[in-house]
Image (cartoon, helix red, strand yellow):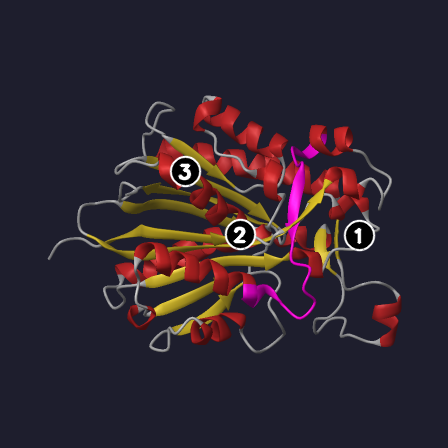
Amino acid sequence: MNTITAAITAVGAYVPDFVLTNKALETMVDTNDEWITSRTGIKERRILKDEDKGTSFLAIKAAQDLMAKANINPLEIDLLIMATATPDMPVAATGVYVATEIGAINAFAFDLQAACSSFLYGMSTAAAYIQSGRYKKVLLIGADKMSSIVDYKDRSTCIIFGDGAGAVLFEPNYEGFGLQDEYLRSDGIGRDFLKIDAGGSLNPTSVKTIEGNRHNIIQDGKTVFKYAVVNMADSSELIMKRNNLTNDDVNWLVPHQANKRIIDATANRMNLEDSKVLMNIEKYGNTTSATLPLVLSDFEHLFKKGDTLIFAAFGGGFTWGSIYLTWAYDKK
């Protein structure tokens, strides 16, 4: 029996229409376009303004985009993995609702949460299900409505985050293309530096937590930046060394879009030229679970069958890692 590898065979994406520019943020908090751009690389981000729509809306749109472009019958999807840090609601899994809404009624579904590493961890999970031989089509969606947990009076967070969704389909491959290796790690030291303080079992929602504004995301920017620079670069370098890859062997770096300086540091450690480093952070900001699939969607037209892609991410918790994948198709 031929060895099964798990390959990405289709990509989809969705971002809301409303654009929140740096200039607009200047009217909301004490900041300016030059300051934001020089420190983050972000020029604008997309915001889902509809109060009656949550992360599921973004995810459904991205999944529908993928299915339409690749002519996928939703009834053939075996599993839907929903990577998100902003589920529609506690307990009732967002992925379950998304699967039903897109017509994937033969699939089972669940949510996966590892902050900004959610999609990276989801890639590993999806690949494992495919490689088991029991599943043929696994839909992995990364989606977040970060505007729902951002305080737009806090300039340390409101300049960074945006809303969006991306989706990829994993299928079995018998030519050796797909996920080749992974290096995934976590460290609970990060619990205090990037979090939402209330709303969970430790600090349940109460009048006190609401009045204290403890339900929005907060971060210690300097500490998170330091850990992210080191760990994204280390994991990317390690996966190259472990697989005897040189900078010439790597066609594309697909990094989490949190901060241009973090991406630059990772690329420098890998000794990659700028043309191999994929970035769209200036358009979308940090969409958390959606950054990696949005990069794939924006640059899918550049990928050739057999290309070597290195994925890298870092998120709250802390969570981080890198994945080595070979591309399985030429875009038609």
Q: How many marks?
A: 3
On-image quarter of the C terminus: top left
295 relative position to 157: left or right: left
Q: Amino acid at mark 3?
A: Ile
Residue at 61% x, 70% y is 88
Q: Amino acid at mark 1?
A: Tyr
* Residue at 63% across, 40% down: 227
Q: Position of residue 96 (x, y in %)?
A: 47, 74
Instruction: Give coordinates of residue 126: x percent, y percent.
Output: 37, 59
Residue 279, given in percent of the width and then of the height, sits at 52, 35
Crowding around mark 1 (Cα neighbors within 10 Å: few <14, some 14 to 19, many 20+) is some
Is residue 88 or residue 193 the one in the foreground? 88
Instruction: Give the mark, 3 or 2, whose residue is nearer the N terminus.
Output: 2
**Name of the residue lying farthest toward the front:** 17
Q: Residue at x 86, y 75 (%)?
A: 207
Q: Nearer the viewer, residue 86 or 98?
A: 98
Looking at the rendering, which quadrant does residue 65 occupy?
A: bottom left
* Residue at x 32%, y 27% (from the top left corner): 249
Q: Residues within 10 Å of mark 3 (few under 14, many from 20)?
A: many
State the separation of the CA atoms marked 1 and 3. Answer: 34 Å
Q: Which mark is residue 310?
A: 3
Quarter of the N terminus within the rendering: bottom left
- The residue to which callout 1 is attached is 152
* Chain-order first, disc 2 or disc 1: 1
Say which element carries label 3. Answer: strand
Per the rendered image, the range of residues in magenta is 39-57
Q: What is the crowding at mark 2: few (fewer than 14 residues within 10 Å), some, or many (at least 20)?
A: many
Relative to 168, 282 lies left or right: right
Answer yes or no: is residue 170 visible.
Answer: yes
Which is more foreground, mark 1 or mark 3?
1
Q: Which residue is mark 2?
A: 290
